Amino acid sequence: MPTPVTSEVAVLDGQAGSAQALPDFSSEAYKDAYSRINAIVIEGEQEAHDNYISLGTLIPEQADELARLARMEMKHMKGFMSCGRNLGVEADMPFAKEFFGPLHGNFQTALKEGKVVTCLLIQALLIEAFAISAYHIYIPVADPFARKITEGVVKDEYTHLNYGQEWLKANFEASREELMEANKVNLPLIRSMLEQVAKDAAVLKMEKEDLIEDFLIAYQEALEEIGFTSRDIARMAAAALSI
Ligand code: PL3
Ligand code: FE2
Ligand code: FE2
Ligand code: FE2
């Protein structure tokens, strides 16, 4: 059935995103998509917690600082659980576990081999940049309750990205080769995770192009800060994304 187009809607559409129409948070379609996205975020925060605790075993002299980061992740997880409860949505945790499976497996393998550089690239650079982009794009289209929580979380995620960035910067020459290899293996996984989440994210009014753009900005800035040149980064992107 065609929906009558009112002039009011036309005016809103013409504002090119400045007054973005919010989704209907109580619709079945929204809740269905949210059950998976919310689960991904809850699982991501839980895994981030576990990963920082694990990193503390690889960098024992910083175990206290890493435990502090891990506690922040627990708080994030609880915050996002309350966002789901607030909307009356049950998070689809089995879906989220599978979603993180490949990246989780690569982190565990690197951990067993004592590869601190690979572990930091996966958690502190890739996962944190992914979270920053997702939360950043989510905030303007979130319900008021979730928006407040997400605004608090995103500040912490910059702290986490910065942690990995500073460690890798201080150890750049020794880490360089392993970083390039870990990027080549794991950046494609982030790309495929973005593809997998795109359809549900669109129901939440989050555009895939915006997610990709924000992710690439955060990740690229981190690599530059660590010591890679623009040329290095272009090569790393080409190697990982086969372009
Ligand atoms: C790091 O501290 C946590 C890692 C979480 C991973 C986030 C990935 C999110 C992808 C989907 C975007 C939706 C955002 C909406 C929040 C309810
Ligand atoms: Fe977090
Ligand atoms: Fe984090
Ligand atoms: Fe942005």
Image (spheres, rainbow, N blue to C red):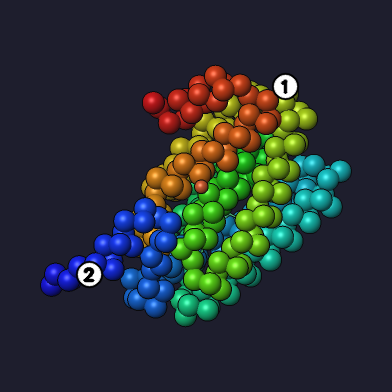
**From the viewer's perspective, is residue 17 above or below residue 237?**
below
Specify the amino acid type for callout 2.
Thr
* The C terminus lies in quadrant: top left
For label 2, the residue is 6
For label 1, the residue is 173
Pick the front one: 136 or 223 = 136
The secondary element bearing badge 2 is classed as: loop
Question: In the picture provided, is 58 more to the left or to the right than 183?
Answer: right
Residue 155 visible: yes
Q: Say whether disc 1 or disc 2 marks the residue closer to the N-terminus.
A: 2
**From the viewer's perspective, is residue 52 above or below residue 118?**
below
Pick the front one: 104 or 6 = 6
Question: In the picture provided, is 212 more to the left or to the right than 161?
Answer: left
Expressed as whole percent of the image width and height from the top left, the position of residue 198 reads: 38, 53
The secondary element bearing badge 1 is classed as: helix
Question: In the picture provided, is 36 more to the left or to the right than 63?
Answer: left
- Packing grade of label 2 (10 A; few <14, some 14-19, many >=20) is few
Specify the amino acid type for callout 1.
Glu
Pointer 1 with pointer 2, Cβ within 8 A: no
The structure residue drawn at horizontal position 65% and vertical position 62%, both measured from the top left corner, is 152
Toward the top, the furthest residue is 231
In this rendering, the label closer to the viewer, 1 or 2: 2
Find the distance from the CA under tag 1 to the CA under tag 2.
Answer: 61 Å
- Name the quadrant containing residue 232: top right
Expressed as whole percent of the image width and height from the top left, the position of residue 32 reads: 37, 70
**From the viewer's perspective, is residue 59 above or below residue 45?**
above
* The N terminus lies in quadrant: bottom left
The structure residue drawn at horizontal position 56% and vertical position 22%, both measured from the top left corner, is 230
